[in-house]
Image: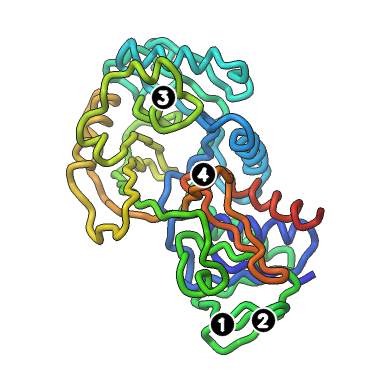
Amino acid sequence: MRVVVVGGGVLGTMHAREAVRRGHDVLQIEREADARGASVRNFGLVWVSGRADGPEIAVAQRARDLWAEVPGISFRPHGSLTVCRTEEELAVAKEAAARPDAVQRGFQVLDAEQTRERNPALRGELQGALWCARDAIVEPREVLPALRLELEKSGRYQFLGGREVRTVDSGEITDDHHETHSADLVFLCTGAWHSGLIRELTDDLPVRRVRLQMMQTEPLDVPLTTAVADADSFRYYPAYSGPSVDALAPQATIAQQHAMQLLMVQRTHGGLTIGDTHEYAEPFSFDVQSDPYDYLTQTVEDILGRPMPKITRRWAGVYSQATSDEIVVRREVASGVHLVTGPGGRGMTMSPAIAEMSFEEIDR
């Protein structure tokens, strides 16, 4: 069978990988020369901690196992620490660690000394942390080229960058180079691109776009041995909801205004990727705002107990998020043409399992 995947991000590339793994011939088409959207503008976190009960955590756990099997990438099963700087925040961690599925999620409450043993770079004042052993890290700017390189070894994979798909009919696709590509099965994994061809195929998608701001620093001169979050992430992720979260002190005004949480990851070159904010109302600004960066910088320095390395890059990104209860919005928009979109901030984490599910649903 010949499979065409439209979209060069992580969701599309994982669909291409799953198709190759199942023995199909695959053509992947990307409108940019290479992916430039949310797939390369994120933390590279494979984030199990905090996922909602039911299908969401099940998909995240399956995806975590699949990521560990991907050859040719920098997969680091380093876990995460959600740092608690007050007794009220530590109470949330203890509540999470008392969940019936705490062992499956890899949850454990650490005191201040144990937290610093796990990650010696955390030298600021803290009460303890929630450890999640199941969280992991990949390199978002490196993983897609690495995946494509592995796929090319099969002899059944081709990538065409700089091509925008114009029409999708049963059995064939045309692009803006006036070339036609035959297809037995098509996956449209176009990310935050909801207009143009997608709107022509379907205009009733339960999705919205979300904008975020992030930054990158010069190398930190010590290893950050885990991913790091602050306690604002307790407010953001559904698994933590409960009386202890309700009892937390109000967020700082700037953090509340921008729906912020701190996530921090050390890249293989030593620099820190730090974020993030969430903006939901369109039209989005075309610029980035300084106040959230200042707030994040102060939070990082409080946790590290030292000045943060110099910021070298700032950027904004936009991702597609389902507004329904679906893990991902999957629709057959024409015969043999399947649109897969809306994983939200879960895309990097869950894409291997989402791709696997796409084929399983079609094969039923």
For disc 4, the neighbor class at 10 Å (few under 14, some 14 to 19, many from 20) is: many
- Please indicate whether residue 19 sits to the left or right of residue 244 in the image: right
Q: Amino acid at mark 3?
A: Thr
Mark 3, secondary structure of its residue: strand
Q: Which mark is residue 339?
A: none
Q: Amino acid at mark 4?
A: Arg
Q: Which residue is labeled 3 in the image?
A: 82
What is the C-alpha distance between the residues marked 4 and 3? 18 Å
Do tag 1 and tag 2 residues touch (Cβ < 8 Å)?
A: yes
Where is the N terminus found, in terms of image quarters?
bottom right
Counting residues from the start of the chain, the first of labels 2 and 3 encountered is 3
Do tag 2 and tag 4 residues touch (Cβ < 8 Å)?
A: no
Image spot of residue 228 (x, y percent): 40, 30
Q: Amino acid at mark 1?
A: Asp
Mark 4, secondary structure of its residue: helix
Q: Which residue is labeled 2 in the image?
A: 181
